[in-house]
Image (tube, grey):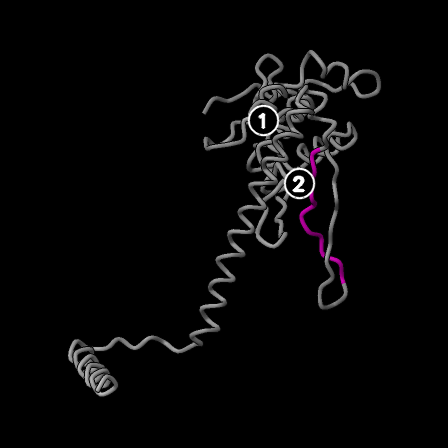
Amino acid sequence: MISRRQNGNGCGHDPTDFRRFAPPIHNHPKILEEARKRIGNCLGGFWDDVFQGSRQKRSERREALGILLSCLVHRVDLVTLRVGIPGERGQFRAYTDVELSKMTGLGIRRLERAMQDLADIGFIKIQRRCKKNSDGQCIGLAAIRTLSTQFFELIGLGKKLKKERGKASDRSTMSSLSALSRNTFAALQKALHGEKKVVRKSRAEHISNLTILKHKLRSASA
C-alpha cells in the first residue's frame, strides 16, 4: 500500500495528487456517471465560483467534498434523489455515516464536515430522524440525504436530469405494477385453492379414476 505524506491534520491529503471516489463497476444510469465526471476534484471552473468569498475551502476540504459528493451521486435513487436503497411499498433505507465512511475512505469527522459543507452550499438537504424506544427515549436513525436539482443545474445536467427522472419513474411504476400483478395472482390462487396441498396420485389411481369416468360417460349416453 502506498503511504501518503501526512499534512497538518493527518488525513493523508496530498495537494498534488487528489484522491477520487472509485465506485464499484456495474450498470448505472449514464447521467449519474456524467455527473461524477463533472464533479472532478472540486478545483477550478464552477467550483471556484461556489467557494468564493466566505466559502473558500482548503484543498484537503475540497478533496473530501469531491469524494463524498461523487459517492452520494453514485448511490442516489434517480426517482426521488434520495441517497440510499429504495424498497417496495415506498420503503427506503438511508446509509449511515459509518457505511458512507467505508464507501469513501473518509474518517467520520472529516465526512461529517464535508456533509455539512454540501448542505451549506445547497447541494444536499439533510433530514435528521429519530424514534422512541420503550422507555420513551429518542434514538437517532440514519439521516436521509437528498441531492438538490440545483446541483445538477450547476454542472449543466438540469434538463437531462428531468428527462431521465421521468424515465426512471416510469420504470419504477411498471415494476411496482408487475409486482402487484404477481401478488394479486398469488392471492387469487390461494383463495381458490385454499391452504390444501395437492396430493400426488399414483399411476394405478389415475387409471382407476379414468376407468370410473368411462363407465359414467357410457351410462350417461345410454
| Nearer to me, 31 or 198 | 198
Q: CA distance from mark 1 to mark 2?
A: 15 Å
Q: Is residue 214 left or right of residue 60?
A: left
Q: Is residue 37 left or right of residue 139?
A: left
Any part of residue 167 in sight: yes
Q: Earlier in the sequence, mark 1 or mark 2?
A: 1
Q: Which residue is mark 1?
A: 31
Q: Is residue 142 magenta?
A: yes
Q: Quadrant of the C terminus?
A: bottom left
Tell me which corner region of the image, top left, top right, bottom left or bottom right, holds residue 195. Answer: bottom left
Q: Is residue 196 above or below residue 9?
A: below
Any part of residue 8 in sight: no
| Nearer to me, 154 or 98 | 154
State the extent of the magenta-drawn residues as a range: 137-147
Q: Is residue 130 magenta?
A: no
Q: Residue at x 75, y 58 (%)?
A: 138
Q: Position of residue 89 (x, y in %)?
A: 61, 55
Q: Amino acid at mark 2?
A: Thr
Q: Amino acid at mark 1?
A: Ile
Q: Residue at x 26, y 75 (%)?
A: 200
Q: Which mark is residue 80?
A: 2
- SS assignment at label 1: helix
Q: Is residue 4 left or right of residue 10?
A: left
| Nearer to me, 165 or 85 | 165
Crowd tier of the residue under label 1, counting other residues whose Cα lies within 10 Å: few below 14, some 14–19, many 20 or above: some
- SS assignment at label 2: loop
Q: Position of residue 127 (x, y in %)?
A: 75, 44
Q: Quadrant of the N terminus?
A: top left
Q: Residue at x 23, y 85 (%)?
A: 216
Q: Is residue 43 above or below residue 188?
A: above
Q: Residue at x 54, y 20 (%)?
A: 4
Q: Main secondary structure of the magenta part?
A: strand
